[in-house]
């Protein structure tokens, strides 16, 4: 077999499984709407939950940062890429979330790889919620530690895996708000079990930060839990991109020695860090945005219940509609698109086989009319 053959075979297989993934080229993409081939759609597929990606305060901060610091960092943070905006953002995040330290990463994917990759050693065990994000499970399975998964959001299942062990450390891994299901982890119970076993809890709160809890401090704050390791990402409610790991001083210093993503990768542009500082302020002052989002979620769930739609039990901005078969999910998504609503069909391997779904996301930028149009379109698409 040649490379070409192998690649062609993999593509054919994907196509036959109806799992071929394609990107759509968009002329504009905002939290509430987008433009595709000159046509306007209501956007129910964005993670820009507060609509900050086009916020004038953030755009201006980025511009001013670029004028002052240029558009690129020029080197990794260990060389000459660590600038004042990085340090300020790290300090502000740590203070806001109640941790001694924050370390910036270029993406949530990188942060998860870096943290798990640098911490987990042979003889350790990583116990992860079965539905954890690909970046977490991948990092865990690439590490020399043993990976075991516990049943989704079931502390009893974690407890069964937490048998006493003689050597090695224990890392328990979960999301705060699950990206494909929209439900929240029982963080208090998970943390308690983890602590009893002498382990550490890592929470990836990509979909909770900015949205959940007081001032948008996220799922952990909302549930009164302070995990030893907290990952927050900036590509969702913060409207930009990048991530931070919140931890104690020694752990931060350890990662600065051993996390390859920090050492061998160019730092985030300082101008972006400036924009993220503005995003942090917007999030902190964003109660009106969170209220609007909550109102949209309530309106949608109320309407969906009246239409007997098969929604998963989620109270967050992620409102998945369970469909089952891949082809059915695709058909439904395209019918919704014909009705001016842009939604994504999520299929395996992103979710377990037989649980293909429409992952509807609501944002603060949607109006009541947007929500009503979506409900109408869902009703029509299902009964077509
Ligand atoms: C989006 C996401 C990531 C990846 O973050 P990026 O900054 O987009 O790389 C990691 N974990 C979870 C749970 C996510 O939803």
Image (cartoon, rainbow, N blue to C red):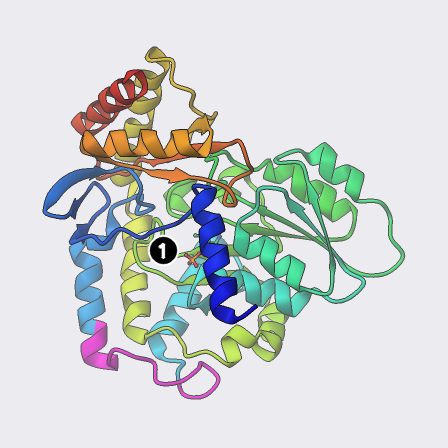
Q: Residue 312, image x and y in percent?
A: 46, 26
Most extreme residue toward the bottom, as rendered? 79
User: In which quadrant of the rendered image does the C terminus lie?
Assistant: top left
Q: Residue at 30% across / 47% down in the picture?
A: 48
Q: Could you say which is closer to the camera, residue 361 or residue 115?
A: 361
Above or below residue 284? Residue 247 is: below
Q: Residue 317, image x and y in percent?
A: 37, 35
Callout 1: CB less than 8 Å from ligand 1? yes
Displayed quadrant of residue 89: bottom left
Q: Which residue is disc 1 drawn over?
A: 235
Looking at the image, residue 372 sits to the left or right of residue 156; the answer is left
Looking at the image, residue 275 sits to the left or right of residue 57; the answer is right
Looking at the image, residue 209 sits to the left or right of residue 184; the answer is left
Above or below residue 41? Residue 239 is: below
Q: Residue 219, image x and y in percent?
A: 49, 42
The residue stretch that appears in magenta: 65-80
Secondary structure at badge 1 equals loop
Q: Could you say which is closer to the camera, residue 247 or residue 364?
A: 364
Above or below residue 271? Residue 377 is: above
Q: Residue at 16% across / 26% down in the picture?
A: 369
For the question of whether residue 103 can be seen, the reply is no
Q: Residue at 38% across / 38% down in the picture?
A: 345
Q: Could you say which is closer to the camera, residue 16 or residue 143?
A: 16
Above or below residue 109? Residue 48 is: above
For the question of whether residue 38 can be seen, the reply is yes
Q: Residue 63, image x and y in percent?
A: 18, 70
74 in magenta: yes
User: In which quadrant of the rendered image does the N terminus lie?
Assistant: bottom right
Q: Could you say which is closer to the camera, residue 33 or residue 235?
A: 33
Per the picture, the main secondary structure of the magenta-coloured stretch is loop
């Amino acid at each position: 077999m040649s490379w070409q053959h192998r690649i062609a075979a993999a593509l054919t297989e994907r196509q036959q499984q109806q799992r071929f993934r394609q990107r759509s080229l968009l002329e504009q993409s905002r939290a509430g709407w987008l433009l595709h081939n000159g046509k306007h759609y209501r956007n129910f597929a964005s993670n820009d939950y507060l609509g900050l990606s086009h916020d004038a305060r953030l755009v201006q901060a980025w511009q001013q940062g670029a004028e002052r610091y240029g558009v690129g960092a020029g080197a990794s943070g260990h060389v000459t890429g660590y600038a004042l905006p990085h340090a300020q953002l790290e300090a502000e995040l740590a203070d806001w979330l109640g941790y001694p330290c924050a370390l910036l990463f270029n993406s949530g994917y990188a942060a998860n790889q870096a943290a798990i990759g640098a911490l987990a050693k042979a003889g350790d065990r990583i116990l992860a919620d079965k539905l954890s994000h690909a970046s977490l499970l991948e990092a865990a399975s690439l590490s020399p530690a043993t990976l075991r998964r516990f049943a989704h959001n079931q502390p009893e299942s974690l407890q069964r895996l937490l048998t006493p062990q003689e050597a090695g450390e224990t890392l328990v891994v979960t999301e705060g708000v699950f990206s494909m299901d929209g439900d929240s982890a029982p963080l208090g119970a998970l943390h308690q079990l983890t602590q009893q076993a002498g382990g550490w809890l890592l929470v990836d709160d990509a979909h909770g930060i900015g949205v959940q809890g007081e001032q948008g401090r996220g799922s952990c704050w909302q549930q009164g839990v302070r995990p030893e390791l907290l990952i927050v990402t900036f590509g969702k409610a913060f409207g930009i991109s990048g991530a931070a790991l919140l931890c104690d001083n020694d752990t931060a210093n350890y990662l600065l020695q051993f996390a390859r993503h920090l050492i061998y990768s160019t730092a985030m542009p300082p101008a972006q860090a400036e924009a993220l500082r503005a995003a942090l302020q917007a999030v902190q002052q964003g109660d009106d945005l969170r209220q609007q989002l909550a109102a949209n979620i309530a309106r949608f769930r109320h309407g969906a219940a009246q239409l007997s739609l098969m929604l998963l039990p989620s109270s967050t901005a992620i409102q998945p509609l369970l469909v089952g078969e891949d082809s059915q999910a695709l058909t439904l998504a395209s019918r919704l698109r014909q009705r001016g609503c842009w939604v994504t069909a999520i299929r395996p391997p992103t979710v377990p086989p037989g649980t293909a779904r429409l992952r509807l996301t609501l944002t603060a930028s949607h109006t009541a009319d947007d929500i009503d149009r979506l409900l109408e379109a869902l009703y029509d698409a299902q009964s077509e």
